[in-house]
Image (tube, grey):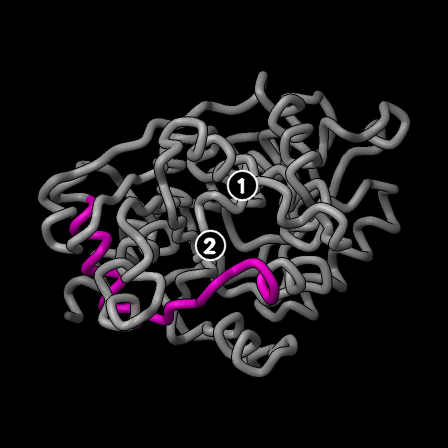
Amino acid sequence: MGSGDGTGDSTEGQGYAADIDSIREAQARIAPYIHRTPVLSSTSIDAMVGKQLFFKCECFQKAGAFKIRGASNSIFALEDEQASKGVVTHSSGNHAAAVALAAKLRGIPAHIVIPRNAPACKVENVKRYGGHIIWSDASIESRESVCKRVQEETGAVLIHPFNDKYTISGQGTVSLELLEQVPEIDTIIVPISAEPKGADDSAQSKAAGKIITLASTNTIADGLRAFLGDLTWPVVRDLVNDVIVVDDTAIVDAMKMCYEILKVAVEPSGAIGLAAALSDEFKQSSAWHESSKIGIIVSGGNVDLGALWESLYKQ
């Protein structure tokens, strides 16, 4: 999680892939192509947590998740000559759909490498937006090798799902926008400052002081199975105050709370911020005592309902 007033000059001059200037440039570039999503609150949830929470509902964003911010920033930053041969990416879900949609808006081809274990609802989103799907195995090595082959065959520009300065700056607009809507927020919890126990590489990396890559991941939060890159790691290392780890049961409970109280459809990765706010680990942290108004990034709402019902029945 990070301090709400840290969207000022803390990254400037530090050599990070993104800073406040690049995020503001991204905000201006993508404004015609995204929604300014609403912020919801609930006195019932506030009472359960013991703090005021403000939910930035990117589940209402185009393509159903915040990923359209980074994808549209990357794609609309391309020169016409670069864009003419299309774009390519690898993703198991929301970034894939976001690239397909942003490419459609720009009028260029999108080649999307998707692992065979990707949620069906997210694959359908890519098809809906006209993306050309190429299948890979589930491993990151397979995804990257297939993506490289497609890039060589087509000449398409790689739109990396996370380790790219334009992607990072685009994603950063969600917090900038939230702080414009609720300036009094002092802490923001995002997916990665809250992390599933079965894919806690960021927490392990923070503890070790270096990037830790897991041999495998096992979590219902499919959007949080990726690993840190050399551009994202310095930001997490230096500017994320803490990483709260929660288990899948807590994530499902938070999803149910979002459905039942907030009345919004949230995917597991999008509910993890609330799960973290409700956790004992957060309540025992220094951030708990220093926070009064907490922003929660509800990152997406593309949930595979079949898998969700199955997980609920196993409880």
Q: Where is residue 186 in the image (x, y as percent from the top left)?
A: 38, 46
Q: In the image, is residue 1 part of the stretch drawn in magenta?
A: no
The answer to which quarter of the image holds residue 86 is: top right
The answer to which quarter of the image holds residue 108 is: top right
Circle on res. 67: 1
Q: What element carries label 1?
A: helix
Q: Is mark 2 on a helix, strand or loop?
A: strand
**Disc with the residue nearer the chain's start (1 vs 2):** 2
Distance from the alpha carbon under mark 1 to that under mark 2? 20 Å
The residue at which mark 2 appears reads as 2
Say if 279 sits above or below 120 in the image.
below
The residue nearer to you, when weighing 127 against 94, is 94
Crowdedness near tag 2: few (<14), some (14–19) or many (≥20) residues, C-alpha within 10 Å: many
Q: Which stretch appears magenta?
A: 236-258
Residue 302 makes an appearance in the image: no
Q: Where is residue 279 in the image (x, y as percent from the top left)?
A: 24, 67
